[in-house]
Amino acid sequence: MELKDLKKTWEQLSPDKELDEQQIREMLRKKTRNLIDRIDRNIRIGFVALFILIVLFILDDFVFAPMLIKKVGNNVEIPEWLMFLSIFSNVLIFTTFIYFVVQYYRVKRSCDISCNLRETLIKITGILRIYQRLFYLALLILTLAMILQFVSGMYSGMALGIEDQGILFSDIPLGKLLLAGVVGLTVLVLTVGGIYLLMRWGFRRLYGNYISKLKNALQELNEIEQ
């Protein structure tokens, strides 16, 4: 709610009373506290959700993928650099979250003691912005790792199948190659794209929307101080 809407609502509720600056500040303080309480709740939700996702990614890298490879053939191996990239992306996502939580509660604790409303809004908004940049960087690396894993696995599987059948790659009809490419690309977009959109939606739902709300509260505070 913007400052003019806040005044209008107050006038409708209390037509005989004038809304002074101190009352507006107190309303903004309560509004900020409500936003912070929601962020606190979402941090706990985000920790559980992110922990589950990381566990699933680890199980995929070290349990499900090796089991699938054994069924395909003993000659197929996951490149070490690809495994390293996958582990690095998972660690990076979890590390950015821990960094955000530590910085957020450090700012919150210090502001509970000595910060005024303006400093609280500015510092918490700044922490959320930093986390937003770090999260999307980590998500981009994770998406790249998943794409490389998928392409590498698809290529290795095709190459092994062709080798087992004793067929030269050049002897495969172009139509079949194109069909395999289209099917692979479709599966890639649905799986990797779905995970990317899900994690981006989750971030916006848990934290991203509060950046604009805190900025609006700061703008309302600036309006009453002018």
Image (cartoon, grey):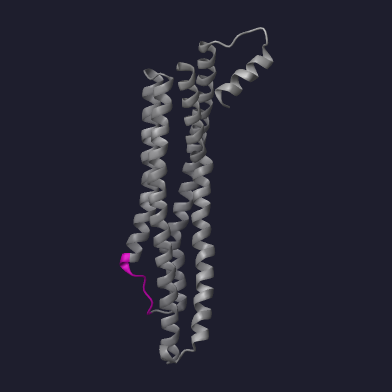
Residue 190's spot in the image, x, y percent? 54, 63
Tell me the chief SS of the magenta region.
loop
114 is higher (above) or lower (below) than 45: above
Which quadrant: the N terminus? top right
- Residue 103: where, in percent of width, then height? 36, 34
Q: Quadrant of residue 100?
A: top left
- Using the image as rendered, state which of residue 102 and residue 212 is in the foreground: 212
Give x and y (percent) for residue 123. Answer: 38, 29
User: What's the residue at 51%, 64% (across, down)?
Assistant: 189
| In this view, 9 is above or below 52 | above
The reply, left or right, for residue 105 in relation to residue 26 is: left
Q: Which residue is drawn at 41% across and 38% down?
A: 129
Query: Residue at position x 41%, y 67% from top?
Result: 149
Q: Is residue 84 left or right of residue 197?
A: left
Residue lying farthest front?
226
Q: Position of residue 116 (x, y in %)?
A: 40, 18
In the image, 84 versus 210, the foreground residue is: 210
Q: Which of 163 and 67 is in front in this view?
A: 163
Q: Is residue 104 above or below residue 226?
A: below
| First to last magenta residue range | 75-81
Q: Does the magenta stretch include residue 77?
A: yes
Q: Is residue 188 above or below residue 29?
A: below
Q: Is residue 21 left or right of residue 14?
A: left
Q: In which quarter of the image is the C terminus?
A: top left
Q: Any magenta on residue 214?
A: no
Q: Residue furthest top?
A: 16
Which residue is at a point 41% across and 24% down the rendered structure image? 120
